[in-house]
Amino acid sequence: MGINHLGHFLLTNLLLDSLEAGAPSRVVSVASFFYATSNLDMNDLMLEKTSYFGFGNIYPYGNSKLANMLFIKGLAKKIEGRGIMAYAVCPGMTNTNVFRTQPGIKNFFTRMSIKFVGFSPEQGCQIVLQCALSKKLNNESGEMYRFGKRWEGVMATLDDELVDQLWSKSKDLVGLS
């Protein structure tokens, strides 16, 4: 959570005035379809009280990716009218070293999945670059993208109350007033 969400949350908030001064500006957060594996608990955001992390320890990763999406949805509301756009991106299963610490058989199946349905790093970064650069997306702040297009409806499923709770909790955890 600290690396995948809180660091980005803090840096983005610290840069908001500069992003506004340099408008038009964009914030792109890399999320993942693994957000669907989350078990986000605002009373235990850092998983200090949790002993079970789901099959294959997936909850921490899924939670952080859901947090990326909630952050972008909340950020889009807060920056509206300031010349800053915010996007969440799912680059798909991309052949990077992110899975390098998985144990033997799990690593094997992950590698095979990437080989047959995954993307090269160049392909994986295309949607990130599209969100960072495409003028076609100027009016779509606060949305999620994957496979080269807007992931219809996924951001609308995120609870606004959860967005606000995460924003408040994240501010407290990183020391923003």
Image (cartoon, rainbow, N blue to C red):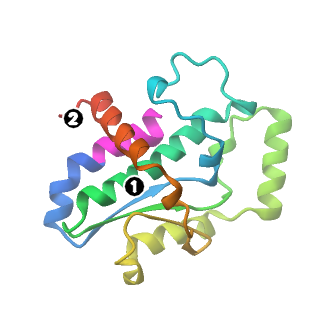
| Region rendered in magenta | 1-11
Q: Image check: 67 left or right of 54?
A: left
**Spatial CA span between label 2 and label 1:** 17 Å
Residue type indicated by callout 1:
Ile
For the point 46% across and 49% down, the residue is 159
Residue type indicated by callout 2:
Leu
Q: Position of residue 49 (x, y in %)?
A: 54, 15
Depth check, front residue: 81 or 118: 81
Q: Position of residue 157 (x, y in %)?
A: 53, 56
Locate the C terminus and report the quarter of the image it occupies. Answer: top left
Q: Image check: 29 left or right of 154?
A: left
For the point 39% across and 49% down, the residue is 71
For the point 70% across and 30% down, the residue is 54
Q: Label 2 belongs to which residue?
A: 176
Q: Position of residue 100 (x, y in %)?
A: 69, 40
Mark 2 surroundings: few (<14), some (14-19) or many (≥20) residues within 10 A: few
Q: Label 1 belongs to which residue?
A: 72
5 within the magenta span: yes
6 within the magenta span: yes
Q: Earlier in the sequence, mark 2 or mark 1?
A: 1
The answer to whether 65 is drawn above or below residue 33 in the figure is above
Q: Position of residue 175 (x, y in %)?
A: 24, 29
Mark 1 surroundings: few (<14), some (14-19) or many (≥20) residues within 10 A: many
Q: How many marks?
A: 2
SS for dot 2: loop
Principal secondary structure, stretch drawn in magenta: helix
Depth check, front residue: 101 or 132: 132
CB within 8 Å, label 2 to label 1: no
